[in-house]
Amino acid sequence: MADIETKFSQNQPLKTQKKFIGAQIFLRIVVIAASFASTWLMLTNKQTIDIGGFVLDANYSYSPEFKFLSYANIVVGAFSFLSLLFLVLVGRRSSNPTYYFILFLHDLALMSLVLGGCAAATVIGSLGKYGNSHTGWMQICDHFGKFCKRATTSVTFSYLSLVCLLILTITSASKSRQIQV
């Protein structure tokens, strides 16, 4: 009976470690996919309309906030891929809390970057959708519907990436505080 209990207690940390690594890998893959989907949607976002003989066009590159979101998502996707490789290489060998502290700092920096991009793009998107009557800025989404829908979808993918990075940050911080047995 005691032999079974010791065997169970020895395997439990290994199973927990495998589940933790599996969840980390899954969330990092979601971050990579969401950030690159957001980038692709934003970089290909443009629309041209004709209003009374005037040809007007909307392009992501006209807004520094949309460019910042795109570049932030490129950086987040690339560095998340590198962290995925790091996790796969290190996760198999050791459960050293120092490695998880490095991942915590990494995830925190990426989360902060994507948070800034999401905030900036959300503000500009809100301004485009609702305008600002106090400053005389008109809404444009009633004319550029396709452009606004793609921008909204892009920002939504960025927020998905942000939530996954938040979960990764919390779990990495928790794991880095555990005492190595």
Image: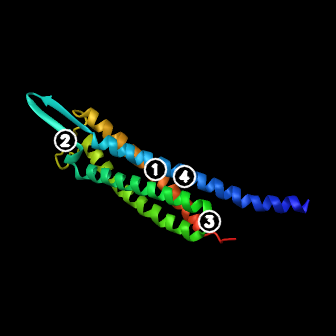
Circle on res. 31:
1
Q: Which amino acid does label 4 sit on?
A: Ile
SS class, disc 2: loop
Query: x and y percent of residue 82 in the render?
Result: 45, 58
Examine the rendered structure and indicate whether residue 64 appears above or below residue 173: above
Query: x and y percent of residue 87 in the render?
Result: 53, 59
**Callout 1 touching callout 2 (CB < 8 Å):** no
Q: Who's the residue at 42% across and 45% down the image?
A: 34
Total count of labels: 4
Q: Tell which circle, 3 or 4, labels the residue nearer the N-terminal end.
A: 4
Q: What residue type is labelled 1?
A: Val
Q: In terms of image quadrants, where is residue 47?
A: top left
Circle on res. 138:
2
Query: x and y percent of residue 78 in the render?
Result: 39, 54
Q: What residue type is labelled 2?
A: Met
In whole angstroms, how far apart are the C-alphas of marks 1 and 4? 10 Å
Query: x and y percent of residue 123 in the render?
Result: 30, 50
Q: Residues within 10 Å of mark 3 (few under 14, many from 20)?
A: few
Is 63 placed left or right of 34 in the picture? left
Q: In terms of image quadrants, where is residue 15?
A: bottom right
